[in-house]
Amino acid sequence: MPGTIHGVIGENGAGKSTLMSILYGFYKADAGEIFIAGRKTAIPDSQAAIAAGIGMVFQHFKLVENFTVLENVVLGAEDGARLTPSLAKARKLLTELAAEYELSVDPDALIQDIGVGMQQRVEILKALYRQADILILDEPTGVLTPAEADHLFRILKGLKAQGKTIILITHKLREIMEVTETVSVMRRGEMTATVKTAETSPAQLAELMVGRKVLLQVDKGRARPSDTVLSVENLRVKDDQGVERVKGISLSVRAGEILGIAGVAGNGQSELLEVLGGIRTGTGRITMNGQEIDLTGKLSDARTRRARGIAHVPEDRHRQGLILDFYAWENVGFGYQDDPAYNHGVLMDNDALRRDTEVKIAKYDVRPADCWQTARNFSGGNQQKIVIARELERNPDLLLVGQPTRGVDIGAIEFIHHQIIALRDAGKAVLLVSVELDEILALSDRIAVMFDGQIMGERLPTETNERELGLLMAGITDTNANAPLPQIVANLARTGGA
Amino acid sequence: MTLPRWADVVLIPLINLFLALLVSGLVVLLIGEDPVNAMKIMVNGAVGSSYGWGYTLFYATNFIFTGLAVAVAFHARLFNIGGEGQAQLGALGVALVALSLPWPHWTVALPFTILGGAVFGAAWAAVPAYLQARRGSHIVITTIMFNFIASALLVYLLVSALKAPGMAPESARFPAGTFLPSARDLFGAFGISFARSPLNVSFLLGLVACYLVWVLLWRTRLGYEIRAYGHSEPAAIYAGISPFRIIMVTMLISGALAGLMAVNAVQGEAQRLLQENVLGAGFVGIAVALMGRSHPVGVLIAAILFGALYQGGAELEFETNVPREMVLVIQALVILFTGALDNMVRDPVKGLFLRLGRRPGADVKAAE
């Protein structure tokens, strides 16, 4: 319907992205027809989608990093062989749009120099420049701070007022409740319901998504922290380009507690996890159970860290946590291939590893329970369960866990959260990094907020709220003052976000 | 959707081969020869007699070693194009060992010539490996360069230090105690007659190498780590696997396997060091590894196929007006279809499997 915001919600693998890819002409539908404004429209490719007035803002932006904003907007929609007229036209349009919808961006800035929030606006501008009437946004807030997300929603409401149709794909129930008029729920490739947002509730939507009732709050008892397990002093880390990403962090995690690290993606949390996990080198002093850990030398690798009782659930299971082309059983031994239980002299004891896999698959309810399936063919949630099972069943003294439920469906989120809390209750230390504030608030016993490679402050989950954390995540420590939005945006632009 | 293993390992290469032969037939037709007849001569020449088999398997032995060399490196996502040079250095190693002592019997000499070929081949691979692991110099470039250096080095040695008296640039003949028993001798011992050919015990060595490479890759921790590294370097680092160690060890094994080819070609056949001992087998190894899907069994089958192509091609040239270049064209077509155009066949076959194999419940997991 023109002038509405329609939400599409569903678990990972429910088919949301596939549906949208069909609308944008990336995939062809096996059967069925698409109607736009009552007219049957065939969308064989994305050119046709653009011609039909569909604009798409992908989860992962499709921008040319070393082009300016203006060049990116024009790219692919040039009026002729000469670029200058198109650029001039785009510049004029951009100024108009900026005034109309709070969509201000510097047209001459390079994409690589502006923050994620800004980049997303460029994506929206691209679609508007191509005269899109229907704007599809795929998980638009995944990389934004709460403040940026609020700004985005204001933009969307402005567009709606101008008669644009907006389709918002998300798995965050709160966003659906906040901005949409109607919402469609997808489950296992089917639309299970389309309801008016005003007439539904988060609990009802969650139930529609999963097909059963789920607890949105995590039940957990009080933490009983004891001795310090991990202590980090003045840690500094550089990334592969030599840019310092962690700028002198100190923190400690005690046995029996979960320390949550909140922050917008790209503010040094990944590097922090990687140094602790032995993937990256750094400077400073880290002790584990009172013994110093080698940060640069021969013993600074992941193998040694595991031997010291550190287990690591990495942020990106596809890139690091799994070998996607390995069978489930091969992945269950991944990182622990030295374990004597899996070895038999020089040969690996694959039978032992497979027996162990059967046990873990059963305990963690990995589906399908097939240890001869390659990791690639499991759904996101089940892939993550394999990683979680592998690392948690080691009963480590310290668990490093990054984005434990990224791209994981609600049913599995519940399960994974319970496992992490069970480990805490067993008297182990947990360092949790997540960009999901809900998750941080639900799981953590203490929360540290990272911004631009530093810890902006530590809070207790009982004594803080999303607004305060959001400001800290944007680098504003004076959380009592009503921080002006431009400062937040400027701060975020400076760090470059993800 | 992943294909069943048998389709991946057997069906697709067979279709590829069939297509290659079909196009070859068209080309033969184009130059005015009878493709059916040409095919008959090739097949007959390659596998129609014990003589044909002898040559086919002799060539195949070379390709088994160079194919395994490329295959092992592939598993660590290293493209070792230097099999040619490593095999030439292996030839040098074998020759030096064979010429160094008046060996009493081949059984005594063989372990040492194996060691010589492997160590020299590995050493030649070690330098590009180190440059890749420490300096990031691309291994494709460095191994190719090392082929030229190896070739130049061999020529230099054959006209100077190692040159035997006479005109030809070749080493002295190896002592008789290093001569490997031929297939004719071995079969003869059981009273079976087998035509005279260069096929020798090295073929059995090749079979053992296939088995050992399989054990290495799928039954040892090192193989597990090599494969893990080959699939994803970031994941390997996460698992505590050292990229430096994997690159070095993998390339050493790869170079050693390429070097072992010389036991067959130099000690088994030529019985002296020649300029053209290797004769492109290092490059054929790439095609063999591609066609064999980097699996030792696949490599074995592909090596025999290429051996047959070599031998059948020689017969074709001998018996008809089909020129030598034509044989190269056929070989090139096989490489093209099995290597480069693989996806052309793969996708339709996948589609076919998808349609035939759609059972209830089978495609639920593929929903994502």
Image (cartoon, rainbow, N blue to C red):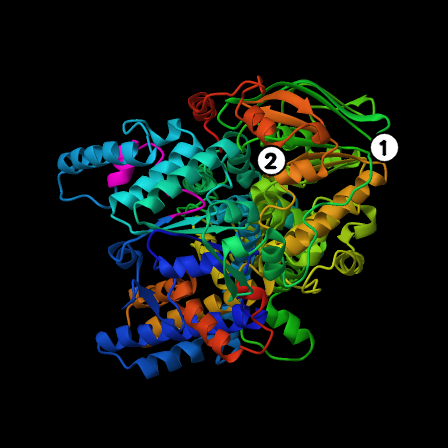
Q: Which residue is nearer to you in this view: A475 or A163?
A: A163
**Element at badge 2?**
helix
Q: Which residue is nearer to you in this view: A252 or B278?
A: A252
The mark found on residue A224 in the picture is 1
Q: Which residue is nearer to you in this view: A226 or A369?
A: A226
**Front position among marks 2 and 1:** 1
* Picture quadrant of residue A66: top left
Q: Which residue is mark 2?
A: B244
Tell me which amino acid carries mark 2.
Phe
Tell me which amino acid carries mark 1.
Arg
Q: Where is residue A140 drawn, in percent x and y?
A: 46, 43
**Element at badge 1?**
loop
Q: Where is residue B169 drawn, in percent x and y?
A: 42, 45
Residue at coordinates 49% horizontally, 31% vertically from top-left? A147
* Picture quadrant of residue B183: bottom right
| C-alpha distance separating marks 2 and 1 | 43 Å
Toward the front, the furthest residue is A199
Magenta segment, which residues? Answer: A57-74
